[in-house]
Amino acid sequence: MYKKLSFLTLLLLLFSNILVKADTPEKDQYNQRMQWFKDAKLGIFIHWGLYSKGIDSESWCMYHKKRSWEEYMTQQAKDFTAANYQPEEWAKLFKEVGADYAVMTSKHHDGFALWDTKYSKINAKDFSAAKRDVYTPWVKAIRNAGLKVGVYYSLCDWSHPDYSPITFDRPEKKLRKLYPQQRAERYLTPWQRFTKFNFNEMHELFERYQPDLVWFDGDWEHKADEWPSRVVKDSLLSWNPKVIVNSRLNWYGDYNTPEQDPPVIAPDRPWELCLTMNESWGYRADDHDYKSAKYLIETFVRSVAKGGNLLLDIGPKSDGTIPKPQVELLKEIGQWYQTNGTAIRNTEAGIPYGHFDGETTLSKDHKTINLFLMGGLKNFTTLRGVKGEIESIKVLGSNSPVKYKVIDSAPWNDIPGIIQIFFDDVKEDPYVTVVSVTFKTPISLYRGIGHAVEMND
C-alpha cells in the first residue's frame, strides 16, 4: 500500500505541481477547524445539473441503464439554460431562513461541471445551453451573504474515458475529445490518468474558491488507497488549512454525513443529516411528495438536540428557478427559526433522556435548558433531576406567563425534585413549542437510581 501511495504522490507532483502535505493535523487544530461547523446548525444543500430538467434521477438513470449517455447528457444539456438563475436571490433566501452554510454540486457522478473547468469540455460553459460558468456567481453570492461555502465534488466521473467501473455504454471516441489530455499522459495507466485529472479539478476548485467545506461523494466505488484518499485529504489541507471534509472520503473525513436517516443515538463526533424535502435530490417534475414544514422542523430540532446539523436539500430547475413548494417550505422553516433561534444557535446537545420526555438543547454556559414540545401542549410537562435555582421560565415567541412549581424535592438529601411547567395560558406554536428554563447558576444533573429520604425537613 505504501509503495502505491508514494508512486501516485510522485506522479501528482510531476504532472500537476500540487503540493501535498503529509502531516496529520493535531487534535486542537481539528477542533479549531470544526468549530464553525458545530456552531452552524443549518445548511442548505443544492443539487443542480443536467438532471434538473426534471424527467429522471441525477446520474443514476444512466447507471441503471434507464437512459443512454446521449439521452441523459447531450439532450438534457440543451435544456440547461440557467435563463432565470439569480444566485443573489438564492443567497438572500438562505440567509432569511437562518442557514449558516450552503453546499452545491460542482460536479455530480455524471461528470457535468458547473464551473468552466479547463480539464473537461463537459461543463456549463462548453457543453450546455447556459454557455457560461454558473458556479462562480453562486460562490460570490453565498460569500457576500455571509455564509460559508461548501463545494460538493463527486470522486467518480462516469463520463471520463479512463474511469472504471462503468455499467453502461458510452461514446468512447467522443469522450476522448471532451476530456483533453497531454501527450505525455499516454504513458500512464488509465487509472493514473484519471487520478491526475481528479486532482487537477480539485486543485482548480481550491484556487478559485477556497471552499470552507468539501462535500465528497462516490467514495464507495474504490478503496481508500486507490483514490488515494489520504493524499486527497492532505492535499486539501495544504491548499486551505482551515477546510473541513465530510465523511465520504473513506475514513479520512472530519465529520459524519448520514443521509435520509436521522440518528437515533448521537454519533461520537461532529455530524450533519442531509435530507431531501420530497423524495428526490435534484428537481423532479413528477415528485410532489413533499414533507411537511412541521416534520422538517422537528427533524432539524432532533438533529441539533443530538449535537448535529441539518443540511436541507433543494433542487432548482434547469432555468435556475427554485420550485415554489421548496421556497414556501424554506420560508416556513425560516419563520419558526426566527422566533425560536435562541434555542438552536449557540447551544450544545441537550441533557440525557429521562430528564425530559422529548428533545432538549443546552446553552453553552449551561444555565438554560430548552425544551422542545412536538406533540402539542398538555396541561403540564415535567423536567426532572436538574439541580439549580430557577431564574425564569418562558415560552419563546410568547409573552404569556408560564406557571411552574417544584415538587418532591429534598435538596439536603441530594434530591432536586421535579419541575412542573403548566400551560394553561400559553399559546401553542403550530410547529414546535419551545420552553426555555433558565437557572441562576450552571446546572448539574442528578443521575442516581433513587433512594430513601432518611431525614425530612
Image (spheres, rainbow, N blue to C red):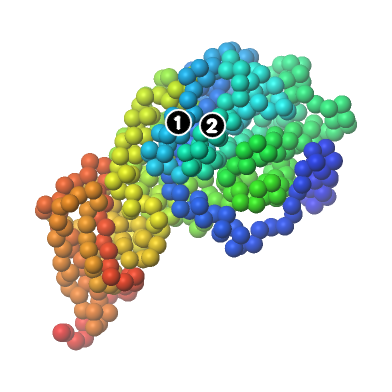
Task: Look at the image and tell me in which quarter the C terminus lies.
Answer: bottom left
- Crowding around mark 1 (Cα neighbors within 10 Å: few <14, some 14 to 19, many 20+) is some
C-alpha gap between disc 1 and disc 2 = 8 Å
Q: Nearer the viewer, residue 177 or 140?
A: 140
Which residue is drawn at the image coordinates 34% and 39% (left, top)?
Answer: 334
- Choose the circle earlier in sequence order: 1 or 2: 1
Spot occupied by residue 17 in the image (x, y as percentages of width and height): 80, 41
Q: Position of residue 32 (x, y in %)?
A: 56, 58
At mark 2, the secondary structure is helix
Residue 307 sits above or below residue 171 on the image: below
Instruction: Identify the residue at horizontal 69%, vertical 46% (top origin).
Output: 239
Question: Is residue 167 something one can see in this rendering?
Answer: no
- Residue 100 sits in which quadrant? top left
> For the residue marked with disc 1, what is the amino acid?
Trp
Residue 280 vs 438, above or below: the answer is above
Q: Quadrant of residue 413?
A: bottom left
Q: Position of residue 271 (x, y in %)?
A: 49, 50
Residue 243, placed above or below residue 53? below
Residue drawn at the location 52% of the way across and 20% of the way down: 82
Query: Do the numbered discs 1 and 2 sit on residues whose CB atoms are within 8 Å?
Result: yes
**Within 10 angstroms of label 2, few (less than 14), some, or many (20 or more) residues?**
some
Pointer 2 residue: 138
Q: Amino acid at mark 2?
A: Trp
Q: Position of residue 170 (x, y in %)?
A: 69, 19
- For mark 1, give the secondary structure: helix
Location of mark 1 (residue): 90
- The structure residue drawn at horizontal position 71% and vertical position 30%, both measured from the top left corner, is 164
